Image (cartoon, rainbow, N blue to C red):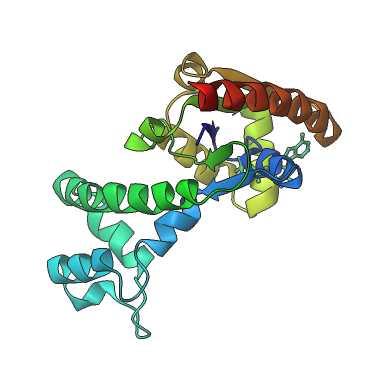
Amino acid sequence: MFTVGLTGGIGSGKSAVAQLFRERGITVVDADQAAREAVLPGSPALAEICAHFGAAVLNDDGSMNRAWLRDAVFADPEQRQWLEALLHPAIAVLIDEALNSATSPYAILESPLLLETSQHALVDRVLVVDVSEATQVARAVRRDGSDEAQIRAIMDAQISRHVRLGRADDIIDNDGPLTALEPAVAALHQRYLALAAQHAGQ
Ligand code: ADP
């Protein structure tokens, strides 16, 4: 399956772009959803996390206590590494399964961490949604009701705009109005259909 990785910083417009591809019948696999599925009650990953950190990592209903775990690894790089070494492959397996069952001519993997994790190895091409930092902060603050400092802290933990753009095969400039996304996606869709046909013929 010819797969395009869709990424961008927080508030850049990934979800908005993904929605437009979905409307064209393209299967979009959501990496955030895979990350949640990987640690559902009963999953092998959650069992290992529980064995490692103890039952304090579970909520009363058996689900993972994300806030507790975030605090536990926040100041401890070794614990964080242990957790990432467990989670990233488990998430990649779920993503791979979802991509393999896609029925559209090509598929999209929407992921905020496409370039920060091994997920980029699952895609043939990278599409970056790009906005100025000012736009990014304003839209994320409005959407999440967070304050600017919280959004900037998340941005600081992500790769820089410059590095992200350097790894893009295609770029959507989303500083304009939402209506400008539609023609941008339409043009990319045509390009991806052609590339997918080429890929299938190889
Ligand atoms: P991401 O998924 O990258 O975090 P979203 O797609 O959720 O970003 O977009 C962030 C917020 O900005 C959402 O509330 C979305 O509706 C809004 N948004 C996205 N693109 C535009 C645009 N071109 N003009 C105005 N608002 C936009």
Residue at the far front: name it: 201
**Residue at the far right in the pictured view:** 179
Residue 120 location (% of width, % of height): 40, 31
Q: Residue at x 43, y 38 (%)?
A: 113
Find residue 129 and report its image quarter: top right
Q: Is residue 129 left or right of residue 64?
A: right
* Quarter of the image where ligand 1 sits: top right
Left or right: where does residue 189 sit relative to residue 133? right
Q: Quadrant of residue 198?
A: top right
Residue 14 visible within the image: yes
> From the viewer's perspective, is residue 177 above or below residue 75?
above
Q: Is residue 175 visible?
A: no
Rendered location of residue 11, percent (x, y): 62, 40
Percent from the top left, x then y, of residue 62?
33, 81
Residue visible at 17% across and 50% down?
A: 82
| Residue nearer the viewer, 153 or 97 | 97
Image coordinates for residue 40, horizontal then vertical, percent:
37, 70
Q: Is residue 129 above or below residue 19?
A: above
Residue at image position (16%, 73%) is 54
Which residue is rendered at x = 51% and y = 46% of the image? 150
Most distant residue in the bottom direction: 60
Q: Give the number of marks.
A: 0
